[in-house]
Image (cartoon, rainbow, N blue to C red):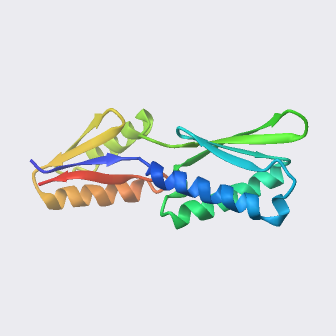
Amino acid sequence: MPSFDTVCEAEMPKVKNGVENTSKEITTRFDFKGTAASIELKDKDITLIGDAQFQLDQIQDVLRNKLTKQEVDVRFLDVGDTQKIGGDKVKVVIKVRNGIESEVAKKIQRQIKDSKMKVQAAIQGDAIRVTGAKRDDLQAAMALIKKENPDIPLSFNNFRD
């Protein structure tokens, strides 16, 4: 029976490259000389440190540009709150989304069921497996999922005929 998986996974090597390129640009830019501006990646958390909120915004812009050049969707970035750290420095932690949250998975499953298509959706951990009798039905389900959830960077893999 034909099936595919709906997933929400960033390619971490590309994210790592984007963070490294951002770090290189921060060290060479004139407006960041002599400041505490820095960026680092640990697991799936990107930490930005700067002297002020304005500087953090500039670093985020550079990061978004570098990730876009690496073909990483910036919707994977979940920006946290700005925190004050020692002295006049501030930091923000950006989480890289990985996996579909259970609420979103249930919503997607409900959308497929309400569409009256001849496919079934099953939540499997942090992915959704969609199965159906015909390939055309699965392609229609892909289009529906993309259209109904524009704010989530979903991708489809493991397509089996």
The residue nearer to you, when weighing 68 against 1, is 68
Residue 125 location (% of width, % of height): 33, 32
Q: Residue at x 44, y 36 (%)?
A: 101
The residue nearer to you, when weighing 131 against 36, is 36
Q: Residue at x 69, y 55 (%)?
A: 60
* Image-based side of 159 in relation to 95, left or right: left
The residue nearer to you, when weighing 76 against 112, is 76
| Residue 119 visible from this viewpoint | no
Figure quadrant of the C terminus: bottom left
The residue nearer to you, when weighing 101 against 143, is 101
Q: Residue at x 67, y 59 (%)?
A: 24
* Image-based side of 111 in relation to 14, left or right: left
* Image-based side of 97 in relation to 41, left or right: left
Q: Is residue 126 above or below residue 160?
A: above
Residue 5 location (% of width, % of height): 27, 47
| Residue 159 visible from this viewpoint | yes
Residue 70 location (% of width, % of height): 50, 63
Residue 97 location (% of width, % of height): 50, 43
Count of picture labels: 0
Work out which residue is located at the far right of the displayed protein and give it. Answer: 87
Q: Is residue 123 above or below residue 137?
A: above
Q: Residue 98 appears in which quarter of the rendering? A: top left
Q: Residue at x 82, y 34 (%)?
A: 85
* Image-based side of 6 in relation to 62, left or right: left
